[in-house]
Amino acid sequence: MTTQHDRITRLSRSRLFRGMSPDELNALMERGTILHIPKGDTICSEGEPGSYVFVILHGSVSIYRKSKMIAKCKDYDAFGEMSVLNGRPRSATAKATTQVELLALDEMEVNKILGSEIAVRFLLNIIQVLSERLEVGNTWIATSLESMRRPRVSADEAEAE
């Protein structure tokens, strides 16, 4: 059985909560809800309103956009923050690829965090996470564009070489 101390230790490893004290993390744990999701279950769906940020305390989650897997999240990763921050519907579907233990923070609790003294650290951590995701996306786009620009060689031309 996972203890509160174990969960706080796990939460401290999440990039969203980097640099926060054990007391601050304990306060976050008290504001959130622990969810146990069976393998294969959908946690949230693309296009639906999103009012929770999820942090994986244990397990793994696959993220899908238009039925194509775009990311895998594991222990200490967070997902769902974009919908909470921008008020738009979920941009992707999240499914448990193993049994998962999550900390779910609803939009009201996130807003309370943003109104507290830990808000600056929390927001800087979110910016860093989103920046890393953007960098990965930009690399993928650049690679895709580069491969599209390469001249295609026909089978006849390849044999002639």
Image (tube, rainbow, N blue to C red):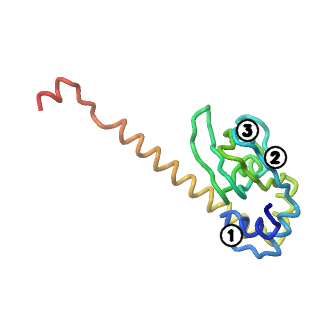
Query: Is the residue 6 above or below the residue 157 in the image?
Result: below
Horizontal side, residue 6 vs residue 30: left or right = left
Percent from the top left, x then y, of residue 112?
87, 61
Q: Which residue is mark 3?
A: 41
Q: Amino acid at mark 1?
A: Arg
Question: 54 and 122: which one is in front?
Answer: 54
Q: Secondary structure at mark 3?
A: loop
Residue that lies at the very extreme toward the front in this rendered image: 1
Q: CA distance from mark 3 to mark 2?
A: 18 Å
Q: Which residue is mark 1?
A: 18
Percent from the top left, x then y, of residue 59?
68, 52
Q: Amino acid at mark 3?
A: Asp
For discs 3 and 2, the disc positioned in front in the rendered view: 3
Q: Which quadrant would residue 160 be assigned to in this image?
A: top left
> Could you tell me which residue is drawn at 62 percent across and 51 percent down?
73
Q: Which residue is mark 2?
A: 51
Location of the N terminus (image quadrant): bottom right
Q: Secondary structure at mark 2?
A: loop
Q: CA distance from mark 2 to mark 1?
A: 22 Å
> Do residues under tags 3 and 2 come within 8 Å of each other at their CB atoms?
no
Query: Is the residue 112 above or below the residue 118 in the image?
Result: above
Horizontal side, residue 4 vs residue 100: left or right = right
> Could you tell me which residue is drawn at 78 percent across and 43 percent down?
50
Horizontal side, residue 68 vs residue 125: left or right = left
